[in-house]
Amino acid sequence: MLLVCAAVCVFVLCGILAGAKVLQNDRLTTEQNDQSQTVSLVFANETRAMSVPTEQATQSPADTGTKINLNTAGVKDLLALKGIGQVKAEAIMEYRRENGRFLSVYELMQVSGIGEKIFAEIKDKITI
């Protein structure tokens, strides 16, 4: 019985030492471009990589100077427009569901809660 316990202890100890050696050879690397950052972990000679969007890649169209298309924008994109909060963004989405595609940017003023003042502030940042 004592011999079996000793063998198990040696096996566990060898496994721990081998694991420690593997940990010394592990490495973490990163590469970044305009769209994403790739993080790679080498563990036990096996590489695992994960791509993470960079801040630039997660900016809304309004932040980058690109016009927001009223016919394709989601709530998140619409929220980037000055004067458009959650309620108005959802109202725009509902208007689009009920009436189909916007035929003109001026049609946006038909959405409840969006009048001439808000339209004047965002008209240069939207398109159809």
Image (spheres, rainbow, N blue to C red):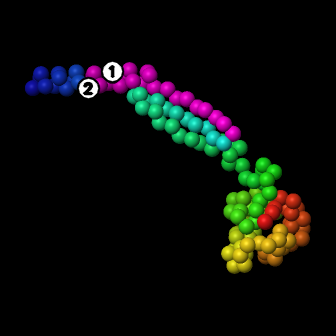
Q: Residue at x 26, y 26 (%)?
A: 12
- Mark 1 lies on a secondary structure that is helix
Q: Residue 19 is drawn in which quadrant?
A: top left
29 relative to 35 in the view: left or right? left
Report the front residue among 28 and 15.
28
Q: Residue at x 17, y 23 (%)?
A: 7
* Residue 29 placement (x, y as % from top left): 55, 29
Q: CA distance from mark 1 to mark 2?
A: 9 Å
Residue 16 is inside the magenta segment: yes
Q: Earlier in the sequence, mark 1 or mark 2?
A: 2
Q: Is residue 92 above or below residue 10?
A: below
Report the front residue among 128 and 42.
128
Q: Residue at x 43, y 21 (%)?
A: 24
- Mark 2 lies on a secondary structure that is helix
Which segment did they paint magenta? 12-34
Report the front residue among 102 and 79.
102
Q: Which three-letter amino acid code belongs to the residue tagged 2?
A: Val
**Label 2 environment density (alpha carbons within 10 Å; few <14, some 14–19, many ≥20):** few
Residue 17, disc: 1
Res 66 visible = yes
Residue 27 is inside the magenta segment: yes
Q: Residue furthest left?
A: 1
58 relative to 121 in the view: left or right? left
Res 82 visible = no
Q: Which three-letter amino acid code belongs to the residue tagged 1?
A: Leu
* Residue 65 placement (x, y as % from top left): 81, 51
Residue 12, disc: 2
